[in-house]
Image (cartoon, rainbow, N blue to C red):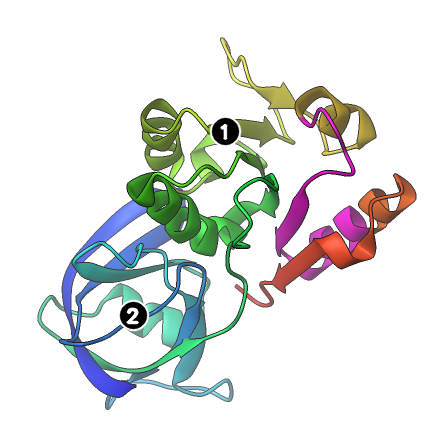
Amino acid sequence: MITNIKLIEKVDVADGTMAFRFEKPEGFEFRAGQFGDFTLLNPPETDSEGDTRGFSIAAAPYEDYLMFATRLRDTAFKRVIRDLPIGAEVKLDAPYGDFTLHKTETTPAVFIIGGIGVTPVRSIIAQATHDKTAHNITLIHANRTPADAPFTKDFEQLARDNPNFTFVPVITGDVPMGWSGEHGHVDEALLRRHIPDLSAPIYYLSGPEGMVKAMRQLLVGMNVNEDNIRTEEFAGY
């Protein structure tokens, strides 16, 4: 579907990270984890990267709005979208992609995610919780600091609502006073603490390209079947 959508809300979801909520077009359907191309309409500035960006849809299909989130880098597109007034429209071309939850509910799902790469995962886990699926889901979400982590409150609430979902926040930088989550880089020891049987899950990797490649190498080195590893790289966010 290609259509214009209207901005209804802008929300800060982490340091330097903003979520944008849009009206959901009549009849628009997508699967949790898919993405769309968003195009600015008559922007006041542009650059060589153009006026279109691909963003994962962070809202779940059952929710009555569309949402995406992005780090606010100093580019023409990010400056324009940051300052977009409520009620303004952008063009949406969606849905695309197959970074979606597998259907076999007896097979666990493990998401190993870096930073803003968590946007499609919010959609996936929110929908699975809404649908009360039997998937055993673990989210390992790595960020430099707690303030850098998008949608933490959402994941904490989903973990309370869904007995099959485990949220494992990981801080790679300085740890604040009272931090009780994981600290340091995601490594074999951390994975073994949270995944009872390493050969059982489907693994989903999302985040910066270097992180995704490192996590794939880590899993393969732990004898995880490569057919059970699915990836989504977030470049240039």
Q: Amino acid at mark 2?
A: Ile
Question: Which of 2/17 is in front?
Answer: 2
Write down the region rendered in magenta: 195-216
Q: Position of residue 9 (x, y in %)?
A: 16, 57
Does residue 25 show up? Answer: yes
- Furthest toward the top, the residue is 178
Number of the label disc, if any, that sits on residue 167:
1
Q: Position of residue 34 (x, y in %)?
A: 44, 67
Say which residue appears at 49% left-offset and 8% top-offset. Answer: 178
Q: Is residue 29 magenta?
A: no
Residue at 57% from the left image edge and 39% from the top image edge:
106
Q: Which mark is residue 28?
A: none
The answer to whether residue 193 is left or right of residue 44 is right
- In-front residue for pair 139/68: 139
| C-alpha distance separating marks 1 and 2 | 30 Å
Question: For the residue carrying disc 1, how many other residues have a C-alpha within 10 Å: few (<14), some (14-19), or many (20+)?
Answer: many
Q: Quadrant of the N terminus?
A: bottom left
Q: Residue at x 33, y 53 (%)?
A: 18
In the picture, residue 33 is in which quadrant? bottom left
Q: Earlier in the sequence, mark 1 or mark 2?
A: 2
What residue would you read off at disc 2?
A: 81
Q: Position of residue 114 (x, y in %)?
A: 59, 46
Q: Is residue 92 above or below residue 182?
A: below
